[in-house]
Each structure stands twice: as C-alpha cells, then as structure tokens.
Amino acid sequence: MSPPRMIKGRPLGVVWVAVLSSQPKSKEERPVNSVKYVAMDVHPGTSLVVVRDTEGRVVAESVLATEAATILDFIHGLRGTIYLTFEEGTHSAWLYDLLVGHVDRLVVCNPRQNALLKAGNKSDRIDARKLSELLRAGLLSPVYHGENSTATVKQLACSYSALTEDTTRVMSRLKALYRSQAIPARGTKVYGKRHRQEWLVRIQGPGLIRRAQHLYRELDSLQALRREARRELIAECRQHADVKWLRSVPFLGPIRTAVLIARVQTPHRFRTKRQFWAYGGLALETRSSSDYQLVKGQLVRNPKGVRIRGLNLNHNHDLKDVFKGAATSASTHSGPWRSFYEGLLAKGMQPALARLTLARKISAVTLRIWKKGERFDAEQLKPQTA
C-alpha cells in the first residue's frame, strides 16, 4: 500500500485534529450529551472543519480530504449531539445526502445571507469559525434540501434549462452576425433550414460565411438535444401524482409544471402564500424607520407608514419566470384569469402592476390546490386582488 499524499506535512485522507487548550483534558470531564456545533468550509480537494461547544469555545479544528469515508470517520468520532452546517454550493447536494442521517441537525446555509463572513479578513479557518458561531447563535438562513423523489425531475429540468439558454445564445449570435453586415434579420426565418441558403448568400467574405455555417450547425445540434431533453422531462414528470392537480391550472403547461415540481419539490415547505411569493420573487420589500413617536406624552405609530421598495431580489428565477410567463399569457387569452385581469384594469390599476397581481394570484391558487390535492375550479376564483 502506497503512503498517503502529504499537505504541509499532514497526510491527505487522514483526519488531523488540533485540540485547543480550552477543551477538557480527560474524557470524564466531557459531558456525553453536550451539543457540538460543527462548521465545514468545503472545497474540491480539502475541507476545514471547526467544532465549538455549547459555551462557544473552539474545541477542535480539522483539515479533511473532501471524501465520503474521511468525512464520515470524523463525524463518527465526535461525541454528544451534533449540529452541522456548511454553505450552499457545488458540493452541497452530495454532502447533504451523505451527512443527513449521521448528525442530529443539518443546516445548509445561504451564503448570500451571511453578511458576517464578508467582513474583515477571509480564509478557510476564519470562514469556518464564523459559520460555527452563527450556527450556535441560530443566525443562519437554511436552504431547502430534502425531497429525493423529485431528484430526477430536478436534474432533467436543469438540463432543459441549460440547453434552452445555450440555444437562445446561439440564435442571438446569428442575428448579431447579420446585423454586423447591415442585413436586417427580423423574425424566425433566419434560423430555419428552408431559407438558410438565402441568408448565407447575403454575407460577404468566406470567413463570415464559415462562421455562420458553424453557428447553424451548433444551433441544429442544440435544438435536437433540447427536444430530447424536453421529452425526457415531460415523461419523468408524468410519474408524479401532483401533475394532474397542477396541470388543471390554466396556462400551466407541461414544462411549467415540470419546473414547478423540480424547484418547489413539495408545497408543504411553505406555510403561507407570502412565503411562496418570496421564494418566487413576487414578494414586496418594504422599508420603515422611526415607527413610533411621542405625541403629547403618548406613544403613537408614525403616520408615514411602510415604504415599498419593489420586489425581493433573493429568489428562484425559474419559478418567477413560470408565474410571470403564465400571467402574461393569461392576460392576452380568454379565460378566468383574463376576467380577473380586466377587473384590475377597471379599478384603475396600471397594466404592469395588474400582471404582477395576476402572477401573485396564480401562484397563490397553485399553492392552495397543490397542498389540498384538488383540481382548479374557476367558480372559486374571487374577484379581489391577491
């Protein structure tokens, strides 16, 4: 057996634990049922782990190889109740599935919410120590991981979304090439195989022609892959019982339904529609200051009230596209949603705000029927705004 590789004198794949002086020296002094707050700063090659006790003292630091066996050996070597956290990233899904059954509580935290990590100096050791302290204080914002039944739909949805973005990018490059030669390229005929030769003869220069031909070949291959990914996504989505409830909502077609299942996974993770709006980027961000003031010795609320600062920025973009796209289609086609939209316009609401209100209404109704497992009923659609 070959000797393990070394990193600064320490073997990779073997746990290195630096026990600090603040840790009790004998095992008899350690409470068996004490809580250990473990934070991991994960990287592709190695990960740095920091362990704190209930009093906030750092009792151990470890440099581990980012391998399943090494990480599990370290976790199994800890005594007491284990609370563990790491940031959402490339390895988070794999690491969550690896550790969820081996710790008492697992928090995959949102790095965008960890403002404390961005202040001051930055290193693996500093980040892991700050994460462990935030975990002990209960100040981490968790990222949902949990429904393995929708894992295949999630991966197929990501594949379809990536292929759609790549196809759109190549189509934009084709039109940009024609525009660079002062050739108008409106519409979709420029992409079709039937009129392709007519467009190529308008280009001057062999280099530009070859470039356009390469883009057309790339577009054909991407479109074929996109159609294949679409078929696989729809076929996999049909195996889930929730599809029949979601498809009953007008303008939620097979692709939008598949994206919903892939991104949301389960509706029961949202207690109210307002939490669902925030996840889909349809919640309003508000600001207020000096909420109370003294008037003649009495404490009263400031009459200025809360100021709205637009929609929330931290959201799932795919989910927002689903409901905004559904609202845009519903506002231009006949049906129960169109009647709701026209009622908002009749009250004097601006069209853009009316479409936003319609998107919020569609998302709220979708969440309700998804939770209850019932079909959409237009008779139950109330005329008031969402």
Image (cartoon, rainbow, N blue to C red):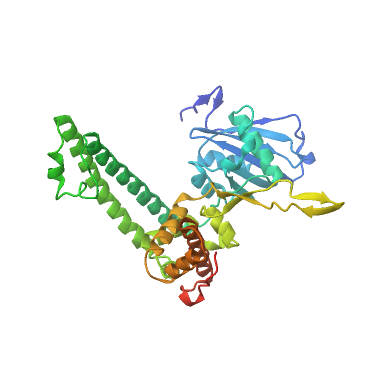
Residue 16 in view here? no
Residue 185: percent from left, percent from top: 23, 44
Q: Residue at x 52, y 41 (%)?
A: 69
- 360 is higher (above) or lower (below) than 174: below
Q: Nearer the viewer, residue 124 or 198?
A: 198
- 105 is higher (above) or lower (below) than 237: above
Q: Nearer the viewer, residue 384 or 139?
A: 384
- Please state the total of marks drawn on the protein image: 0
Residue 40: percent from left, percent from top: 59, 38
Q: On the image, which quarter does residue 273 sit in? A: bottom right
Q: Residue at x 29, y 51 (%)?
A: 226
Q: Residue at x 60, y 33 (%)?
A: 118
Quarter of the image containing the C terminus? bottom right
- 291 is higher (above) or lower (below) than 357: above
Q: On the image, which quarter does residue 78 sit in? A: top right
Q: Is residue 169 left or right of residue 379?
A: left
Residue 51 in view here? yes
Q: Residue at x 28, y 50 (%)?
A: 225
Q: Nearer the viewer, residue 152 or 223?
A: 223
Residue 56: percent from left, percent from top: 74, 38
Residue 214: percent from left, percent from top: 20, 38
Residue that sits furthest to the top in the current view: 8
